[in-house]
């Protein structure tokens, strides 16, 4: 019986991880739409109205997207903003 429970737990865990990855990708795609400085400033103002613990995940995604944009721009020979 223990093996069945372990297999079930593993399946549930994998399913939850898939759901979490999909949600993360969806949120990342939505946040990627905020590209201009004005859009980002507005988003930062909105995030500033909420508790930092509530916005940590969003801020991490935005920071990663900023890093990727700067890295891509630099790799392509562009200027660094």
Image (spheres, rainbow, N blue to C red):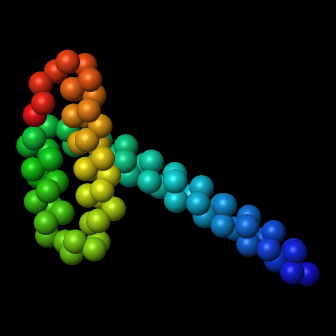
Query: Hey, which residue is sitting farthest bottom in the picture?
Result: 1
Residue 71 occupies quadrant: top left
Image quadrant where one finds the N terminus: bottom right
Please give the name of the residue rendered at 66% of the width and 61% of the height, measured from the top-left corner: 15
Give left or right: position of 18 versus 51.
Answer: right
In this figure, what is the number of numbered marks? 0
Residue 43 occupies quadrant: bottom left
Give left or right: position of 4 versus 57.
Answer: right
Please give the name of the residue rendered at 69% of the width and 68% of the height, measured from the top-left corner: 12
Residue 44 occupies quadrant: bottom left
Front residue of this view, candidates 80 and 57: 80
Give left or right: position of 5 versus 75.
Answer: right
Query: Hey, which residue is sitting farthest right in the picture?
Result: 1
Is residue 61 positioned above or below 14 on the image? above
Please give the name of the residue rendered at 10% of the width and 34% of the height, measured from the top-left corner: 81
Please give the name of the residue rendered at 79% of the width and 74% of the height, measured from the top-left corner: 6
Give left or right: position of 65 versus 45.
Answer: right
Residue 64 lies, in percent from the top left, at: 30, 47
Is residue 3 positioned above or below 27 on the image? below
Residue 36 lies, in percent from the top left, at: 14, 37
Residue 69 lies, in percent from the top left, at: 25, 34
């Amino acid at each position: 019986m223990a093996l069945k429970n372990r297999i079930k737990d593993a399946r549930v865990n994998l399913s939850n991880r898939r759901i979490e990855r999909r949600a993360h990708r969806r949120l990342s795609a939505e946040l990627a739409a905020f590209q201009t400085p004005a859009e980002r400033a507005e988003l930062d103002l909105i995030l500033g109205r909420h508790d930092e613990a509530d916005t940590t995940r969003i801020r991490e995604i935005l920071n990663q997207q900023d890093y990727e944009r700067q890295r891509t721009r630099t790799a392509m020979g562009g200027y660094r903003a």
